[in-house]
Image (spheres, grey):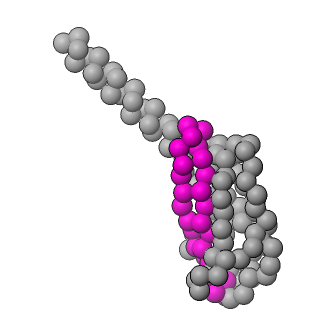
Amino acid sequence: MKNLLKLVFITAFFFSAWANAHVDLTASTPEDGATLSEAPTEIAMSFSDEVRLANVMLHSDDGKMHPIDFSMNMTPKTSYDIAVKNDLSAGGYTVYWTAMGGDSHKISGDFSFTVK
């Protein structure tokens, strides 16, 4: 019985630590799937916990990469604001990002928007 209780405790501890280590993108501007009447001048990203944002890229649907004012910063933060360097023409865009959580695990994702 003691061994069973130990196993239950260790399992519960492992899963609670795993759940706390998981960091998500909680908000973005533009929002994922948004249709904008004018091109954004900035991309904002908020996370559920502090991360080190390692890479951010902005691509149009035709595959072209668009310049943004991003450089990797080793200071962990929960939110980032990144300037878009050029005016974006009408079309679809995707922001691809990679970050490192506090537990040193790499996380990545993307979100898309359309400019009318």
Image quadrant holding the C terminus, namely: bottom right
Residue 94 location, quadrant: bottom right
Tally the numbered discs: 0
Residue 45 location, quadrant: bottom right
Instruction: Name, please, the residue furthest toward the top.
Output: 2
Residue placed at 34% from the left, 23% from the top? 10
Q: Is residue 35 visible?
A: no
Residue placed at 75% from the left, 61% from the top? 70
Image quadrant holding the N terminus, namely: top left
* In this rendering, position of residue 14 left or right of residue 43: left
Residue placed at 59% from the left, 66% from the top? 96
**Compared with residue 91, is residue 66 higher up or lower down, i.e. above or below?**
above
Q: Position of residue 36 (x, y in %)?
A: 67, 80
**Compared with residue 14, is residue 57 higher up or lower down, i.e. above or below?**
below
Q: Position of residue 21 (x, y in %)?
A: 51, 38
* In this rendering, position of residue 82 left or right of residue 24: right
- Dominant secondary structure of the magenta stretch? strand
Q: Is residue 40 magenta?
A: no
**Compared with residue 105, is residue 39 higher up or lower down, i.e. above or below?**
below
Q: Is residue 111 magenta?
A: yes
* In this rendering, position of residue 5 left or right of residue 77: left
Q: Is residue 52 visible?
A: yes
Q: Nearer the viewer, residue 62 or 78?
A: 62
Q: Position of residue 110 (x, y in %)?
A: 56, 65
Range of residues picked out in magenta:
91-116
Residue placed at 66% from the left, 53% from the top? 54
